[in-house]
Image (tube, rainbow, N blue to C red):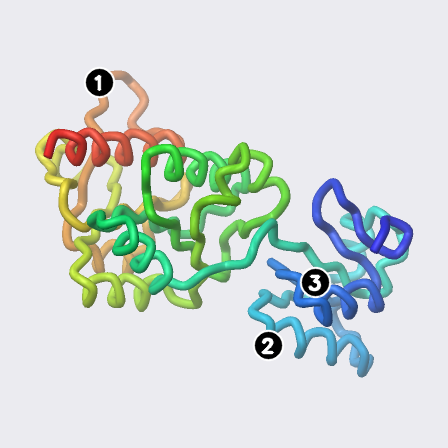
Amino acid sequence: MDEKEGFDPREGQIEGRNAVLEALKAGRSLDKVYIVKGDTDNTLRYIASKARAAGAVVSEADRRKLDSMSVTHSHQGVIAVASVRAYESVGDILQTARDRGEVPLIVICDEISDPHNLGAIIRTAEASGAHGIIIPKRRSSGLTAVVGKTSAGAAEHLAVARVANIAAAIKELKEAGVWIFGAAAGGGTDLWKTDLSGPAAIVIGSEGEGMRRLVSESCDFLISIPMRGKISSLNASAAAAILLYEALRQRSTL
């Protein structure tokens, strides 16, 4: 499939009905599919159904948004964004830890919508030896080309699970013996007093809102990074880096 057929290799964007259908038939991993709002066309309904069955997030968008997104200027009411790799499951992440003979270290990203932040978190997680990342299907960046590029290739080596419900994923982790640590700005136990040497999943919330209430309430512990300056919080990817490397430091001394 070349650019003239509706594929933009720079961003992994696929445009047009035939191009998106062929991508689905070929088993291409799609992160999101945008369908023009209010169109009852049978072909578009079929594309939406196939995309959902393949695990992609399907969103309606008005034609003006699709026009602004389009590179080919011939989107025919549908634009798909390809994933840089296939998603895995929470079970796959836990199995990776078992295969390595290590206690799990996992990052849960609660609605990190900025692809640059998600890419940076993936890069740090892979470098620090984490076993995987969990992201929600909705209100989150996915494994787009921008995320892949920002991760400096780490997205090719680190398992990423995309789940419908973060709270349900946390429950699954708890049943597997994993403790859940939520990063909370201005509250919780001081990081330097927190034991991250055991099976741990670290929850990072969005920059603007932090963790959602139900996610925060699902955590076993809330932890905070000591701040000594006038700024009261850190960028999500910076916070993740500090927490992950403190976990690595503690595990390296065992």
Q: Looking at the image, which residue is at 60% across and 58% down?
A: 31
Residue corresponding to mark 2: 53
Circle 1 sits on which residue?
228
- Indicate the position of residue 151 as horizontal and vertical percent values: 51, 36
Q: Secondary structure at mark 2?
A: helix
The quadrant the N terminus occupies is bottom right
Q: CA distance from mark 2 to mark 1?
A: 49 Å
- The label on residue 204 is none
Ranked by sequence position, the earlier of labels 2 and 3 is 3
Residue 172 visible (yes or no)? yes
Residue found at x 88% / y 56%: 5
Instruction: State the residue in front, 224 or 90.
Output: 90
Task: Give the labeled residue for mark 3.
Answer: 34
The quarter of the displayed image where residue 36 is located: bottom right
> Compared to 182, does 251 lie above or below?
above
Element under disc 1: loop
For mark 3, does the 10 Å Cα neighbourhood hold few (<14), some (14 to 19), or many (20 or more) residues?
many
Can the viewer see residue 236 in this picture?
no
Task: Name the residue rendered at 86%, 64% in the picture.
Answer: 76
